[in-house]
Amino acid sequence: MLGRDAKVASSARRAGQRGLRCAGIAALVPPVGRSLPWGVLGAAAGLGPVLGWFTRLTQEGVGTALAVFLLRVAAVGLALGLAFLLDDPARDTTAVVPIRRVVRSGVRLVLVAPLAASSWAAALLLVPERIRPPAGDLTLEAAALVVLALSGAACAVRFSDTPRPGVAVAGTLLTCTLLATLLPTSGALFVQADAASWAVAHQRWAALLTLALLAGAALQSEPVRKHRLRLEDTHRSAARAAHR
Amino acid sequence: MTTRPTVSGSGLTVRYGGSPALDNVSVRLQEGVTGLLGPNGAGKTTLLRVLATAVPPDRGAFTVLGHDPGTGAGRQEVRRRLGYLPQNPGFHPDFTAFAFVDYVAILKEFADRSARHREVRRVLDAVNLSEVRGKRIKRLSGGMRQRVALAAALLGDPGLLLLDEPTVGLDPEQRMQFREVIAEAGRHRTVLLSTHQTEDVAMLCQRVIVMAQGHVRFEGTPAELTARAAGRVWSSTERDPQARAGWRTGLGTFRNVGDPPQGADLLEPTLEDGYLLALDAQSVEAMSA
């Protein structure tokens, strides 16, 4: 019975390969969309606007400092939620499919990007203009935190077998963020909007974002061997021997 | 004339931390069902994960269906042509059986919707799940979930099917159904079946590999493995302390496996006896090392 429709299988595959580039990725969108952890993502995205709206209740004078604090909490909350983006209970079952990991992760990212962006934009816009801190700089902070979370999740997917790395990644990110608030002034990341070191701190955030982006991109690769350079010759000669 | 092997590998070594999970293993698989026996920690799952391209080996190389997974392009080709049922398959519990297998089909590059759906129906039919294809996975029994994962592995009529302990946790009836599907699958493709169940091997497999501590301890036919125990299984009223393994049977006598004493009441060996002796040989080696 299994062999009866082998032609059906192969013709389906050929059709699939021809239209793979676009149709394959488009076909992935609905099931991947259904499989995302929308509960935690929605909670994280909802936190920003709530905190943004909360700044409207603040008194003049302390408003900007509090707005910076609340927006940073919103950014951390958003990043913690996105740490769960690559959680996939079916990871073992879909571990060895031809569609590359970068495509699978990319589809997930594209699906949540509008939600994350609109959440952050709403949080910023809800802060009254008179107390709104520099939006670009705080967006840089939020972007760095989000990319750190995503890179952490990518790292867990690459180096562990756990299908749900989100809790561990979020916990690590939260710990690192809390530790970062203890950094000395010379290396501080979280500084007040009126501090002289604001610009320098945001150069550090930019560097952190760049590093996290590079790490995240590098972690999307799926190595075909563990020690490529050292074992190149051994591998090739063994492959030839195996062919013989 | 010799048939080209589906899988051919040599020197396969995988280390976790300092200890080898696979140590210089050579493997050669051809069409039919090959059983992979061994105790926990023998390296069975690691070997399957290596052959499935889930884990690259630290050393050694192999080919699958003529492709070298040591290159990016080769690995893609291998992944297009193999089916892999992991030890603990995971699912999206809110998906229906059909939707989940359809999702895996998309990941296996079946982009054309109608052709893909035909293929999904075909594999669900092959594992006798057509009637529950609209049911959510969280509402299916453990055996049915295993069959959903097997259906996903069968997508695309793969030339190589790697099954990691597929019958664990199944009741006898479910195991029988699984055996039927695996036997059918092995009629025109290569199946490597990792299992603890010597019965599964005896009933299904044309060849058997016994692994222990990352090494291959035996490779041959089930009959050859059974024959290794010929003259080395005997019955006694008490457990023979010289036996390498022994247990009380339902008849109240002891079945001993090892080197029998003079005049022992020899019994007909089974595959399990041969397996125990293959394992025991390596244990002795390990102790003396």
Image (cartoon, coloured by chain):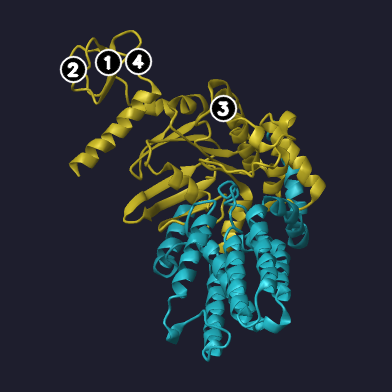
Q: Are marks 2 and 1 in contact (CB under 8 Å)?
A: yes
Q: Which residue matches tag 2?
A: B261
Residue A185 in percent (x, y) is at 44, 85
Of pointers 3 and 1, the one earlier in the residue sequence: 3
Q: Which residue matches tag 1?
A: B234
Residue B101 in percent (x, y) is at 69, 42
Left or right, residue B176 beside residue A50: left
Q: Rounded to the nearest whole Å, what is the CA distance between mark 3 and mark 4?
A: 25 Å
Of pointers 2 and 1, the one earlier in the residue sequence: 1
The amino acid marked with disc number 4 is Glu
Q: Rounded to the nearest whole Å, what is the CA distance between mark 3 and mark 1?
A: 31 Å
Q: Chain of mark 4?
A: B
Residue closest to the eye, B65 or B148: B148
The amino acid marked with disc number 2 is Pro
Q: Rounded to the nearest whole Å, what is the CA distance between mark 3 and mark 2?
A: 39 Å
Give me the chain that's yellow.
B
Of pointers 4 and 2, the one earlier in the residue sequence: 2
Please tell me the colour of chain A: cyan
Q: Which residue matches tag 4?
A: B268
Q: Residues within 10 Å of mark 4 (few under 14, many from 20)?
A: few
Residue furthest right in the image: B114
